[in-house]
Image: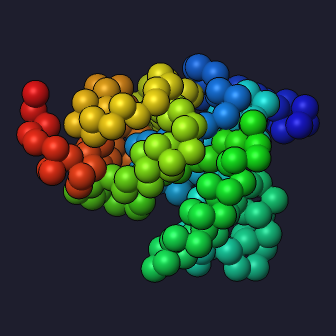
Amino acid sequence: MRVRRTFARGALRLSRWRLVGDVPEAGILVGAPHTSQWDWVAMLMIAWANGARPRVLVAAHYFKGVVGWVLRRTGGIPLDRSSPGATIRSLLQAAEGDDAFQLVIAPEGTRSKGEYWKPGFYRISQQTGLPITLGFVDGPTRTLGMGPTFHPTGDVVADMDLVRAFYADKLGIKPENRTEPRLREESAEGPTDR
């Protein structure tokens, strides 16, 4: 683990990216804005620089050949998007027996601009009791790291208002691909402009 920490801190220093915040001991780590294929590397650098070894959900089609081997060795977990239930159930079971369980999720689900975030990070937190920590990549300021940690209250709109406020000035590596933090479930809760 010390080798990964040293490597990550050195790589960040050489690339002139500034790291802020600390990774909590356990929880769901949100990786956003997800605008580039480099976001996965950025979230790993954040975790490793803080001595953490998270699991990272990655679309299953990337797990082929050498890339698949590298993904598995660095905590990648293949997610079959057509049937994510089995993967999520397995993760929930792993979280129950691991006090240092960390899972990185990119809730935008795509590197392209979208309309909604996927609610998996929120649901897994509710089901496991693990807190949500907001991780970020901001290309214009060359800053990455961790922001606030919170437990979902059940008021989806209020919780996502907190998320929106934090990410309001975080643009990602390719700002034009950023998706505003919003869950489809918020429509059922009422207006989001309160």
How far across and how far down the image is residue 165, in percent? 29, 25
Q: Quadrant of residue 141?
A: top left
Q: How is the image coloured?
A: rainbow
Question: Can residue 42 be seen here?
Answer: no
How far across and how far down the image is residue 194, in percent? 10, 27
> Does residue 181 appear left or right of residue 75 in this picture?
left
Front position in the image: 5 or 129: 129
Point 70% across, 79% down: residue = 64
> Does residue 94 appear left or right of residue 22 in this picture?
right
Point 13% across, 37% down: residue = 192
Q: Quadrant of residue 191?
A: top left
Front position in the image: 176 or 145: 145
Point 37% across, 56% down: residue = 118
Point 76% across, 63% down: residue = 72
Question: Can residue 9 be seen here?
Answer: yes
> Does residue 133 appear left or right of residue 64 in this picture?
left
How far across and how far down the image is residue 47, in percent? 69, 36
Image quarter in which the N terminus is found? top right
89 to 154, vertically: above or below: below
